[in-house]
Amino acid sequence: MEQPEQETVTSLQPPAPVAEPQAPPVPQPQVLTGTTVFDAEKVSCYYGSFRAVTDVSLSIYEHEITAFIGPSGCGKTTVLRTLNRMNDLVNGARVEGDVRYRGASLYGRDVSPIAVRRRIGMVFQKPNPFPKSIYDNVAYGPRINGEHNKKKLDEIVEHSLRQAALWDEVKNRLKSSGLGLSGGQAQRLCIARTIAVEPDVILMDEPCSALDPIATSAIEDLMRAIKSRYTIVIVTHNMQQATRVSDRTAFFSVLRNEESDTRTGVLVEYGRTEQIFHDPSDSRTEAYVTGQVG
Amino acid sequence: MSTITGQPPDLHEAAGWRRTKNRIATAAMWVAFVLVVIPLVFVLITVVARGIGIISWQFLTASIPPQVVPADIGGIGPAIVGTIEIVGLATVMAVPLGILGAIYLNEYGGRGVLARLIGFMADVMTGVPSIVMGLFVFSIWVIHFGFSGLAGAIALGCLMLPVVIRSTDEMLKLVPNPLREGSYALGATKSRVTMTVVLPAAIGGIVSGALLAIARAAGETAPLLFTILTVTTVNRNVFSGPNTSIPSQIFANATSPFTGAQDRAWGAALTLIVIAFVLMIAARIITARFTRYSR
């Protein structure tokens, strides 16, 4: 784990306008418009000498839900984790290419991953509430950002739990352990915890894969409800989920090199969700979304 | 309506070699258990039987009389005070350092050269015989500054340090990584993650590991032989002048030909066992208390 110890926010200035024209990302048959939050350009991710993802270029748009789909090992989680520098925590992980967040380079010199993650939150595959009370779980983020006013914290906790549609279920037991919640509740607690720091973007790594259909549907409703305030990127194995919640979909696949016997993840196609699922331009996408492979 | 045709299948466990093996293994386990328990029970019965009659308030507080004096006069007060002073000082030196060392190994060092070196050194240090540790402190400290409780505490601290590092290290390894990632994802720095998520999740195990190390140190004799000597009156200054401890007193008295001294050794042995027992119980209680939120 290599992690610079920086409390102060030195870099990641307010978005500077990106002047130079960008090379059009991989196959993009339609014109995508809107304010972009992320612009990834020729991003490759390595774990040691293993190249997990090769040359991914895509833009993620404000106040939309973008879904990453694809078979296992295609690198969609890896790409997601490069968006808030979570992969810095993995030994030997390395990123090539450029990821811009509102114009600022995420992997530029002196960029603090701490500052990045305060703006770009993450919800994980397995609900991971801290072994603390429900209240302390939600108040954790505001507290590390220096908020210690009891009244303010109460407000933030209630507001976040309400947004995460969990308030009514836990309002009478805020002091009990966050580990006593069911899977779906625990995942909503993790979302509330993320919302509490008022991030700009929420990254979700298969947030429903450990949940039953009812809890999944609660999380999906929640995502649709909060997308007007946040930009959401979600990795999912569930294609129905992608069609239900996402505005845009990126399909990743595994590219095998028979000669060197290596494999790497690539972005096959990216576009509006209905186009990806109903009118895919790449045969691999079509095979995947219609269930012929994978 | 469903119908069942033919004989119902036989769902009983089949007799035979597999069953026999199971019985043999179970019997072997019981034998091993009894073999382990026999010495423990004998030690406890003997020490309690011979020590219980000796212990009184006077025995626990009075100064140590000459060895010829019978057991109903005098006591082991200076040894109890000395043990508390020396083990306390050793704890203050070894436990924080050991916990910090383990945090470095686990959270900061990663697979770096320094971390691996420290881990290896801690393992080597665990293997150093306690009497060698006593000799080491004798040669680097006692020769220059004389006998003192401090010298004994340094020797005990050197013995406790690797134990604390290893037990804390194991506890930190048990903290699931998703917890750390959850904290990082909220924009926490590494020190925050360590202080607010990792340590609270592991604190029960860390404290009980430290208490067990303290209990071990309280019973050590060899490192104290040439670092504190023995005295017969309370030495309140742990930093200078010879001191004494319960194990040193047991050692001195048990090898004495006088029955009074031998009786005092039994009483001191029982006192030591009770102290160790109390620390073990405290370790259990603390572990249970701190894991309140974790299940």
Image (cartoon, coloured by chain):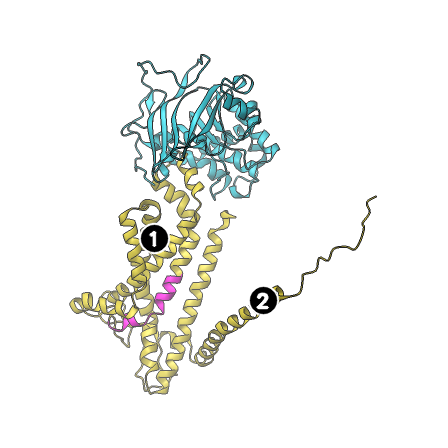
Chain colours: A cyan, B yellow
Q: Position of residue A203 (x, y in %)?
A: 45, 29
Q: How many numbered circles are shown?
A: 2
| Res A48 seen here | yes
Give the residue pinned by disc 1. B99
| Res A149 seen here | no
User: Residue shown at 43%/38% (left/top)?
Assistant: B182
Label at residue B172: none
Looking at the rendered image, the quarter that the C terminus of chain A falls into is top right
Looking at the rendered image, the quarter that the N terminus of chain A falls into is top left
Q: Which residues are magenta?
A: B212-226
Q: Are marks 1 and 2 on the same chain?
A: yes
Residue A130 sits above or below residue B23 on the image: above
Label at residue B21: 2
Name the foreground residue: B286 vs B201. Answer: B201
Q: Is tag 1's residue or tag 2's residue first in the polypeptide sequence?
A: 2
Element at badge 2?
A: helix
Q: Main SS of the magenta segment?
A: helix
Tell me how far mark 1 sits from mark 2, CA to CA.
Answer: 45 Å
Task: Please tell me whether residue A109 belongs to the stretch shown in magenta.
Answer: no
As drawn, the residue found furthest toward the left would be: B144
